[in-house]
Amino acid sequence: MRRDKNRHGLSLVETLVAGVILSATVVTVSALSTRSMSGAVKNRAYEKAASLIDRQITFIDTLGIDAFVEAGQTQGEFGQTAPGYTWKASYELLGVDNLYEVTLTVSWQEGVGKKSQSVVTRFNGQSILF
């Protein structure tokens, strides 16, 4: 096929190739943006869980580990401040002058599965030695 030097424009093949390249670019950008949004939602859930863990640890520290152990409440919900999030604490007396190791786990429902984040820390109870 010969091209006339006076004709300006693109051939059908050139137009189709440009359309395919443009379509592939749009699909790729859309997929990347969807992944980015999905990652942001997951990151927000983990940040909220970390904040709730910090709040619960602060509560235990303010109350005192001995009073927390006496109360016996080792699990609960955060209520309206964080609906769908629950917490569970387990503790172990390490035997070194009332030193407790506390594991605090915050769980939440995400999609069809359950996600959780845990922290292990230590609290010093009231000393029995004076």
Image (tube, helix red, strand yellow):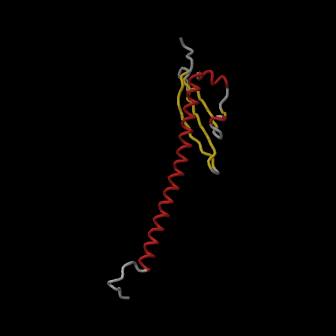
Farthest top residue in view:
130
Q: Quadrant of residue 127?
A: top right
Farthest bottom residue in view:
1
Q: Residue at x 54, y 33 (%)?
A: 120
Relative vertical location of residue 110 with respect to residue 17 in this rendering, above or below: above
Farthest left residue in view:
5
User: In front here: 39 or 108?
Assistant: 39
Q: Residue at x 63, y 35 (%)?
A: 81
- The quarter of the picture where the N terminus appears is bottom left
Q: Is residue 77 visible?
A: no
Q: Position of residue 63 (x, y in %)?
A: 60, 22
Q: Position of residue 111 (x, y in %)?
A: 63, 50
Q: Position of residue 117 (x, y in %)?
A: 56, 40
Q: Is residue 92 visible?
A: yes
Relative vertical location of residue 71 with respect to residue 87 in this rendering, above or below: above
User: In front here: 11 or 49?
Assistant: 11
Left/right of residue 14 with respect to residue 102 in the rendered view: left
Relative vertical location of residue 71 with respect to residue 39 in this rendering, above or below: above
Relative vertical location of residue 24 with respect to residue 69 in this rendering, above or below: below
Q: Quadrant of residue 53?
A: top right
Q: Residue at x 52, y 50 (%)?
A: 39
Q: Position of residue 93 (x, y in %)?
A: 58, 26
User: In front here: 91 or 32?
Assistant: 32
